[in-house]
Image (cartoon, helix red, strand yellow):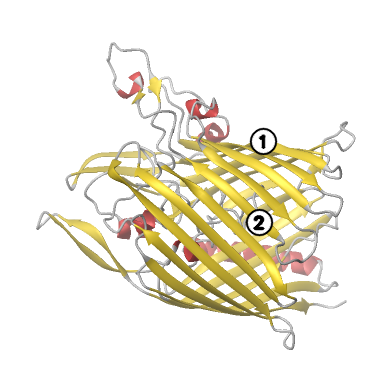
Amino acid sequence: MRNISIMKALMCVALLCGGVTSFAEIPVNYDASFIGSLGSKDLAPYYISSNNHGILTQGDNALLRGMAWKPLDTRRRFSYGFGVDFLTGYSNSIAYSKYNAMSMSLTDNNNQHPARIWLQQLYGEVKYRGVFVTAGMKQHTSKLLNSDLSSGDLIESGNARPIPELRAGFIDFQDIPFTNGWVQISGEISYGKFTDNDWVKNHYNYYNNHISTGQWYTYKRAYFRTNPDKPFSVTFGAQAAGQFGGTTEWYQNGRVYRTETRSANLGDMFEMFIPKLSDKEGFVAGNHLGSWDLIARYRLKNDDEIKAYFQWPWEDGSGIGKQNGFDGLWGIEYKSANPALVNGAVIEYLDFTNQSGPIHWAPGDYPGTTLTAQATGRDDYYNNAYYNSYSNYGMAIGSPFMRSPIYNLDGYPAFVDNKVRGFHVGISGNILKPLDYRFLASYRKSWGSASIPRLHAVEATSLMLEAGYKVAKVPGLNLKAQVAMDFGKLYGNNFGACVTISYNGLLKIGKK
């Protein structure tokens, strides 16, 4: 019912905007696709599912996808846009473990699969000068990294389904007054509501850890950039995301031993924007995480670009103060100005093994203790003691390099392999004028997590080769084929293939 209400509101906005501008032609893009995939396991190989907005998670799929959207016209002072995107079809079912109180044992919770039809995107947006406001579900990708070739942004990577939200910010980068174009700013802020309650309930084992429902989401970003017209420029800043509100139930040996409900009013939203230390517990409200980001770009004389960048993650004050060692994403990117056999390449090193150290002791966790010193380590990236893991519909909202909870067939609701280290490589290019390719490869080694370390480290090697072909005789018709595989004990040996057939075009509605 909530999605229906959002749809009605957005349709009214679109009709009002259309009525105001009915004298003009409204360009609407459309795309119709068939997506078919087969896999040797119930879940898709890593590179078919990752950074794909949570669309393909199962091994076997036969989906139809329809999209229609009007983008914002950045050339105009005022502009509006909207979009709708839905999928329907078949995806295979998977069994997840679930505790049975009657038999006091874990049993298979069969028939878990994505909905046979779902809304992927539904949004409306407006802009005035350099500021925009978006309402609804809209896919977002990294503002810093190459979303096609990178392993993924640490905070918002485009790996999970979009969250219904209200988001506002700057259109791209804007000049800061009195800097004469030498410094620009880009920023966004959003508040949204998770809609994956049913998914979480259906995939949880109800035996240990905890489960949260009714959670809210917030995201903030601020980047500064030096003059991009110069050969050398630098972009730096930070991202911050958070979860708040909702109800959490803690389970131990299949029984609820604690329940807590938290508010999500305007005051709580403000505290998520500017955190305030609680006098009662010594903590700030909500679950906070983020990253310090930097990218340095150099443009060659032929307009090719070379970039070096990093993202340093943080989960609390120790991470904000960079007390988490070498943890982070470190990368180099090459980008060609013209189509070439290699028009883009990325090499990244990722390390999440420090996490501010393995020991955590906070006096606020133990009321009445005489020990007042504290050691703020064991950050446990993407996990939290009060809220669900940093994921949506089982897929990491941040980097998929840490194995997402959807892979936990035992029904454990958190990231169990976030103490991980490895490499990622991405290459793209043009072989012939209508034929493009993309190659992704990674290796990683996981020691489990700081809270639940593995007895023996496990490894994974993942590969994916993609070819895209534009049919010249039928403008708008595109074919894409992917072959991907995983080796090792982290994901298991897995092989899969995916084919996408799409047709896109432009509709012009209204009168000239």
Q: Percent position (x, y) of residue 185?
A: 76, 39
Horizontal side of residue 294 vs 96, given as left or right: right
Q: Residue furthest bottom?
A: 473
Residue 31 quadrant: bottom right
Q: Residue at x 79, y 40 (%)?
A: 233
The answer to whether residue 154 of the structure is visible from this angle is: no
Q: Which mark is residue 99?
A: none
Residue matched to label 2: 345
Residue matched to label 1: 237
- N-terminal of the two: label 2 or label 1? 1
The answer to whether residue 313 of the structure is visible from this angle is: yes
**What's the distance in space between the residues labelled 2 and 1, CA to CA?**
24 Å
Q: Percent position (x, y) of residue 448?
A: 34, 44
Q: Percent position (x, y) of residue 343?
A: 72, 61
Nearer to the camera, 1 or 477:
477
Q: Residue at x 36, y 69 (%)?
A: 113
Q: Are marks 2 and 1 in contact (CB under 8 Å)?
A: no
From what the image shows, is residue 173 above or below residue 495? Answer: above
Nearer to the camera, 495 or 161:
495
Q: Residues within 10 Å of mark 2 (few under 14, many from 20)?
A: many
Nearer to the camera, 305 or 251:
305
From what the image shows, is residue 197 above or below residue 48? Answer: above
